[in-house]
Image (tube, grey):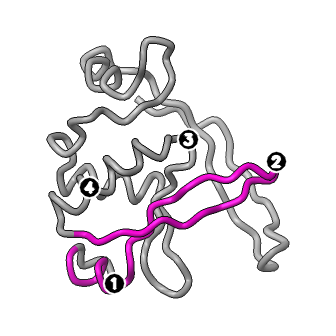
Amino acid sequence: MVEVVREYSREDQRYGITNSSGYFRTKSIEDLKPIAELFLDESGNKIIPSNIAEHLTPRSLAFWIMDDGQQVKRGGVTLCTDSFKTDEISILREALKTNFNLDTSIHMKKSRSESIYERIYIKKKMVSKNLNLF
């Protein structure tokens, strides 16, 4: 069950546009807890399991892109992997190559606090050839 809490708009001064968003909460489903636990360490921090390729399906990739991906203006898709370690990102990249024949690269990004993090980039030709998104 989804409960809509509020809707709001905010100005994006970088592009001079107004973005509208909805904020909502969902209730947890106990049956999904074992899946969630695959992606958490003993301390409750997010991790990438070493066997992620076994779980990465076309449907899960679609959800990943819709939830934590973004289309790049020049084409292609960036997957926001900001909170993962370099070795975990390598596991993800290998799974994308193995499961979908996607060649990826890393885009380095700088946060507001000046820390550097990595994002997986899938080139436009890979997206259109292998994923049929564009």
Quickly name the residue at label 3: 83
Quickly name the residue at label 4: 94
Is the residue under label 4 in contact with that under label 2 (CB below 8 Å)? no
Give the mark nearer the N terminus: 2 vs 4: 4
**Distance in Å between CA atoms under marks 4 and 1:** 23 Å
Q: What amino acid type is highlighted by mark number 4?
A: Glu
Q: What amino acid type is highlighted by mark number 3?
A: Ser
Is the residue under label 3 in contact with that under label 2 (CB below 8 Å)? no
Q: Nearer the viewer, residue 12 or 83?
A: 83
Crowd rating for badge 3 (residues with CA inside 10 Å; few <14, some 14–19, many 20+): some
Find out whether residue 86 is within the magenta segment. no
Quickly name the residue at label 1: 134
**Distance in Å between CA atoms under marks 4 and 3:** 18 Å
The range drawn in magenta is 102-130
Q: How far across and down, in percent of the image, does residue 82 sit?
A: 56, 48
Mark 3 residue element: loop
Foreground tag (4 vs 3): 4
Foreground tag (4 vs 1): 4
Mark 2 residue element: loop
Image quarter of residue 50: top left
**Distance in Å between CA atoms under marks 3 and 1:** 28 Å
